[in-house]
Amino acid sequence: MADFKVNHITNKNGKSGTSFVGVTTVSSTGSMRIPSGPTDYRGGYRSRGIFVSGRADPAADGKVLDYVNITTTGDAVFYGESMNASRYGAACASQTRGVFAHGYADPAISNAIEFITISSFGSSSDFGDLSLARNQLGALSNDTRGIFGGGNPQTDVIDFVTIASKGTTAQDFGNLLATTQSPAGCSSPTRGVFGGGEQSPSYITKIQYLTIATLGNTLNFGDLPTNRRLLMSCSSTTRGLFTGGDNNPASSSNVIEYITISTLGDAVDFGDAYAKSQGGAAMSNTVRGIVQAGGQGSSPTYTLTNRISYVTIATTGNAGDFGDLTQARRGLSGFSGSHGGLG
């Protein structure tokens, strides 16, 4: 018999706390991990989602960084600015740091990577460079390594960076199954997945995967039910979601599909996002997924949206209204410090 007593936790009136007596075993079909580290890392800014740049009007790319608290709903709030205006880049993050590749920085595509410390408001700083300048690339990460795949000009290149180490050029990780632009990336702590994209002149359904800790080429995972590019993706530690995108020819989608990241196979229907959109951003805190933020509608108007919609990743169903970005825009990217790749 063992006694576990807690006598230093008090209520608001300062009365004595609770004693747990006679607890000797814990039975569970899963696992239990005792929280560690500063309390700021357990919730708080780790559930902060950041939206990066994008084009807010037909004439100019933007520098705006917005943020939301993924655990609640509400409109995005101004966070700071990127060093350079850009659109159609890609972003990923560790628990503490977000890194993002510019994509297109007017008047040309860029190889620049910037970073922010998620807990700190303000402007971004220089991180390093991609091995190849490109836009419309995909990104994913675990807590150590950030991975950037594909892009325009169409390439099969996969780069990686160590998120904690700035001032470096991204290194070669391997290659995608084929040259691909605008794939969507998500991850568990061990496996990264890229879904959809464009292999000119066709949009594709292909889903491919890699092991984040091991250099090498992607392997075939399965397929999306519909071919599309410029889709959005997020994940828990077990499930990846793919949202919206551009159906060929030039018609935006609101479909949400999901995979079980540890199990190879085709994606299946999850529900619908709040609006049809392509070229927006997505992120998660492993429980809740922001499946769509911003982007643009279908041809011929391609109307920009500021709408944010969300789901509970472990269930299926249609997305609910979360709030609005500070400005409607397309070609933005997003990340959080508590996504599925972080465990």
Image (cartoon, rainbow, N blue to C red):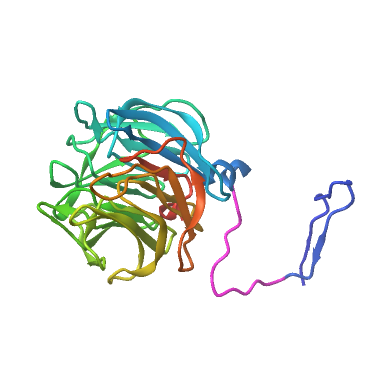
Q: Is residue 29 magenta?
A: yes
Q: Position of residue 152 (x, y in %)?
A: 16, 42
- Residue 212 visible in the snapshot: no
Q: Position of residue 157 (x, y in %)?
A: 16, 46
Q: Is residue 32 magenta?
A: yes
Looking at the image, residue 131 lies above or below residue 265: above
Pick the front one: 333 or 74? 74
Furthest-left residue in this view: 201
Looking at the image, residue 127 lies above or below residue 156: above
Q: Quadrant of residue 123?
A: top left
- Residue 319 visible in the snapshot: yes
Q: Position of residue 272 (x, y in %)?
A: 40, 63
Looking at the image, residue 67 lies above or below residue 126: below
Please identify the quadrant where the N terminus is shown: bottom right
Looking at the image, residue 129 lies above or below residue 338: above
Q: Position of residue 199 (x, y in %)?
A: 13, 53
Name the residue rendered at 43%, 33% in the picture: 65
Q: Quadrant of residue 97?
A: top left
Instruction: Give the left or right position of residue 24, taking residue 200 as reference.
Output: right
Instruction: Give the left or right position of residue 43, taking residue 150 as reference.
Output: right
Q: Main secondary structure of the magenta part?
A: loop
User: Which region of the structure is painted magenta?
Assistant: 24-36
Name the residue rendered at 45%, 45% in the picture: 336
Q: How many numbered circles are shown? A: 0
Name the residue rendered at 19%, 26% in the picture: 107
Pick the front one: 217 or 46? 46
Name the residue rendered at 41%, 30% in the picture: 64
Pick the front one: 289 or 265? 289
